[in-house]
Amino acid sequence: MPGVDGVTANNLGSVWDSGAGVLVSWQPSDFGLRSANVAVATAGAFLTVLAAERTQQAAQATVSSWEILERSIHSLVAAQLRPGAGEARVNAELAVARTMLAQARQAVGIARATLAQFIGNDAAHRTLAADKLTGALPAAPSAPPLDAAANPLSIEQNAAVSQQRSQLKALQKTYYPQFLVQGLASARGAGMETGGARLGGANGLAPTVQNYGVGLTVTFPVMDNFAIEDEEAQQRAKIRAAQAQSRLTSTQLESRFNAALATLDGARNVAANTPTEVSSPEAALKQAEARYQSQLAPIDDVAQAQRLMVQARIGDSLARLSVWRAQLEIDTVRGDIQPFLAEASK
């Protein structure tokens, strides 16, 4: 039975039809916020890796020391020159040291995995000078007042305020007449003619028929005055909220800056004292080992001196890294960590 325009209504044949469209979305700028966050996170993760590695090194040195002592006391016990209780105590301390080493290795693996999120898996902890970060302190920073406006967070918040203001201006001009010159271009492809005949083959797979149009449209929102006024009131509220958020961001940056300065001062004082904390336990350990070898002191004295020395070495490395971490926080709040990277990479 014939259908509309001569096309058979009960037609089970098939033809090709096609169409095409493209949508492109692009964020031209984030005002450096993302790159700054990535750089800070990378530097922080690197310092965490260094701290874990230094703890692992101290644990490895402890294991090696106890292994040497274990071999020595085993020979003495085998020759019946020392009681077996001393060897049992050394073995217990060695087991504890090996457990600490295993935990330290685990911490290093986790820290490196975190770092790899930012710089890949190519052992990129060579980016900064590891020996300098754990062996020296950064130069005493100058203390100019904080320019919070230079931080990417403030830049982003100020841009948000400007955006809201621009939207208000656009709303205020909405009641004006709008003149639109419009143009249209399109193309289509079809595998069936208007009379119902099928072209067959690949006809219709690609657009083959073009069309265009031009026009002029004039709009004037006569009845939208009250709605526009409400939208303007909402937009002013958004501007006030954005301004409040901008002020809050500046206040938070000031607070972080002052806290970072206080942390840096305290970390420097601690780091200046830790070398003494390291040298004293090292000397005490040598004396305890010598007294034990001369049978003038029990093995407990050696174990206690060993633990104090390990804690002091780890504390010394962490204290130096704390100074660098505080310096990183200061430069982060300033909105530029290049000074930190430049000094830490020398």
Image (cartoon, rainbow, N blue to C red):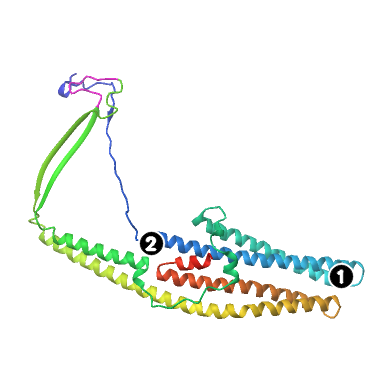
According to the picture, the residue beneath numbered tag 2 turns out to be: 33
Figure quadrant of residue 189:
top left
Q: Position of residue 76 (x, y in %)?
A: 88, 69
Q: Is residue 207 left or right of residue 307?
A: left
Compared to 209, does 148 lie above or below? below
Q: Report the residue at 50% width, 55% height from top.
A: 119
Q: CA distance from mark 1 to mark 2?
A: 64 Å
Classify mark 2: helix, strand or loop.
Answer: helix
Indicate which disc residue 142 carries.
none
In reply to whether residue 197 is colored magenta, the answer given is: yes
Indicate whether 316 appears above or below 64: below
Q: Which of the 4 quarters of the picture holds residue 98?
A: bottom right
| Residue 267 percent across, percent down from the top left | 54, 77
Q: Residue at x 21, y 61 (%)?
A: 167
Residue 157 as seen in the image, left or right of residue 35: left
Percent coordinates x, y for residue 49 in the rendering:
57, 63
Task: Give the residue number, with chain letter if any, for mark 1.
Answer: 84
Q: Nearer the viewer, residue 220 or 58?
A: 58
Classify 10 Å Cα crowding around label 1: few (below 14), some (14-19), many (20 and above). Answer: some
The amino acid on which the numbered mark 1 sits, given as a three-letter code, is: Gly
Q: Nearer the viewer, residue 330 or 338?
A: 338
**Segment colored magenta:** 190-200
Q: Residue at x 10, y 60 (%)?
A: 225
Quarter of the figure that contains the N terminus: top left
Relative side of 134 to 29, left or right: right
